[in-house]
Amino acid sequence: MRLAEGREAQPSAAVMDSQSVKAADTVGSDSRGYDAGKKINGRKRFIVTDTLGLQMVVCVMSASWQDRDGAKTSLLSTYLFTPIRHVFADQGFAGRLVDWAEQMLDTTVEIVRKPADQHGFVVHPKRWVVVRSLAWLTAHRRLARDYERDPAVSEASIRWAAINTMIRRLDRGRPATRQRRRTFSTPG
């Protein structure tokens, strides 16, 4: 897929982000938590994608984990299983994580900051691919909320959804296009 997009076979950089999702009653209290920033009681998904938005690593934890602390597991997996040593992330990952990744993993975590004069929503270069990937995941109904008792099963469900997305992209063989919505007018 990367070759079809005109890229090298192995990615050289990645993008990391997290997403807090509500947990159903089936999720035990030992693996759920409260994300005070988003006011969500549930779990947090940490994903790492390549620069095309293809998922490489996923980790599911309690939502009470801070981004910079929970991301260590994702970065460690990225370090162990991929040749990537440059990761883009948002401001939530700034601080101790950047130094830890540089010292322990010889990996550069580049924080993509929003411009000081930004008001409202603006697409940030280097980060929109991971945000888009998270949106694709929540488009799968089963992932709109976390229902799994075991976080490992939740991670497997996320991988399954990512594989489904990759297969649809491969099958299409061209960039996605939006279909025009039909509008119906009432006679009158």
Image (cartoon, grey):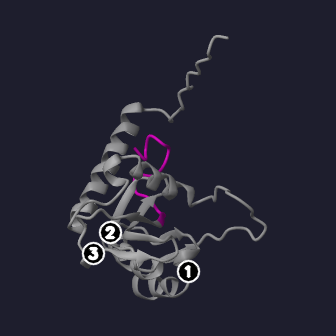
Return the x and y of residue 177 as percentages of the image width and height: 53, 32
Query: Which residue appears at 53% of the width and 27% of the height?
Result: 179
Which residue is the site of mark 1? 94
| Residue at position x 36%, y 46% in the image | 140
Which amino acid, mark 2? Val
| In this picture, residue 120 sits left or right of residue 77 | right
Q: Which residues are magenta?
A: 1-16
Q: Nearer the viewer, residue 145 or 171?
A: 145
Residue 162 lies left or right of residue 4; in this view the side is left
Residue 8 sits inside the magenta stretch = yes
Q: Is residue 69 magenta?
A: no
Instruction: Name the residue that disc number 2 marks.
Output: 60
Compare marks 2 and 3 and give the one earlier in the sequence: 3
Query: Residue flagged by tag 1: what amino acid is it?
Result: Ala
Quadrant showing the C terminus: top right
CA distance for labels 3 and 1: 25 Å
At mark 2, the secondary structure is: strand
Category of crowding for the residue at label 2, using alpha-carbon neighbours closer than 10 angstroms: few (below 14), some (14–19), many (at least 20): many
Q: Along the line of sight, which residue is nearer the eye, 143 or 69?
A: 143
Q: Is residue 132 left or right of residue 172?
A: right
Q: Which residue is mark 3?
A: 31
